[in-house]
Amino acid sequence: MINSLTYLAEAAEETKHNPIIPVWQEIVVGSAAFIVLCVVLMKFVFPLMEKTFQARVDAIEGGLKRAETAQAEANELLEQYRAQLAEARTEAARIRDEARADAEGIRQDVLAKAREESDRIIAAGNEQLSAQRESILRELRSEVGTLAVDLASKIVGESLADEARSRGTVDRFITELGAGTGGR
Amino acid sequence: MIGPSTVLAAEFPPSVEDFYLPSILPWGAHDSYWFTKITVLVWVAVAAIIIFFLVSYRKPQLVPTKKQWMAESAYGFVRNNIAIEMIGPRGINFAPYLTTLFMFVIVMNFFSIVPFIQISPNSHIAFPAILAVISYVMFIVVGIRHHGFFKYLKTALIPPAPWFILPLLIPIEFFSNFLVRPFSLAVRLFANMFAGHMLLLVFTLGGFAMINANAWLAPISVVSWLMTIALTFLEFLVICLQAYVFTVLTASYVQGALADEH
């Protein structure tokens, strides 16, 4: 208490302070301090921060752009693959059609050839048949003649001496025979 | 703990003289202001802010570290929520100064609730006055640069009103824009910090005064000291709010100076 009393006494002797009147020494000190603060922060810190912010924005935007280009590239590739696939498909279809057409053509060819061949074979057979028939007919004619003559001579009991006469008889007989069968 | 004898060195009720502590160098002098607790605190604030920002922003990285993030949030808060919000895209140019101002005011204010310090330099009007004068000069210079001297005076002083009312409006505009602004800016901050300190003093010293006067009053002293704690929280609110208000008003003055219409 004594302390405080002496202090009070001292304070009372001092000029009273008015809180609204600034102390000029404090103004000097405060200005200097604030200027130091401003210089340091505004020169060395905040521009750096703005730069960092900008770099960050760039990094993010760059990343986005990179992703975008990658996406576009992928899309393009996909489109390309799709186009290639479609092309391959049409190509395959074309090849299939062609092959089908070829196969049909070949079938037709083979068929035609076979038909031709069969026709040829039939014709040859026919020809051969008729030739055989001719020769058989010829053989038969002579044999029939002989047989008939033999038969006749046996029946009649006399040999026909005159060959020419006999030939004439045979020929006549056969002609009659041919006329008899010629109506067929 | 500061013993009662030291605290009671100041009488109760507290007076303006409690804001003017004896100087440190020369020790105990009452009329020397170069090296006092107040000026030391100012330098401490400046040093603390500078060290914080320089250390946390020494090696800035794209993906910030925790410290870097904190420094960036302080700047980002003022830049985005005050400068750009109030002034618009051009506010980025003012963001460095506004952030410096904000940090300086809030740290200086904060001393008023730091144990063992518990007085803010801003409770001496010299410091708010300096900041207010800088804001004042700044918005006028910005206005003149943007519009030119006469056009700026015209936009600042002549509101779009019928001619016959102008003789009344121009003095009011002049008074409010060029006389009251710096004064109100400085006094608002100073008075808040002054009153905050005064309140804490009243309740702290009041507790001691009562317990000294009568031991039976001890419970009331305890209540008084609990009030001090509660008021410290209130003071914290005031600290942040006043720093914000000072910065926002400065930004708003700059915005007014840059605005093309009234």
Image (cartoon, coloured by chain):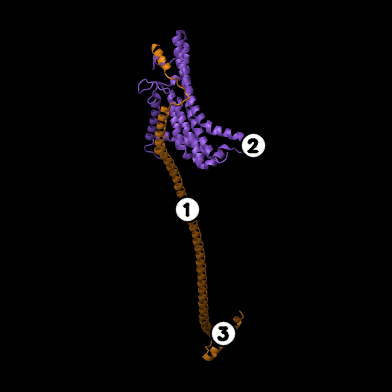
Q: In the image, residue B177 lies at what x, y percent?
A: 54, 34
User: Which shade is chain A?
Assistant: orange
Does dot 3 land on a helix, a strand or a loop? helix
Per the model, the C-alpha gap separating discs 1 and 2 is: 72 Å
Could you tell me the amino acid type at mark 2?
Phe
User: Which shade is chain B?
Assistant: purple
Q: Residue at x 47, y 38 (%)?
A: B94
Residue reaching furthest to the left: B26
The chain that hosts pointer 1 is: A
Q: Which mark is residue A174?
A: 3
Which image quarter: residue A26? top left
Residues A8 and A173: in front is: A8
Q: In the image, residue B171 lies at what x, y percent?
A: 58, 33
Q: Earlier in the sequence, mark 3 or mark 1?
A: 1
Q: Which mark is residue B164?
A: 2
Residues B128 and A101: in front is: B128
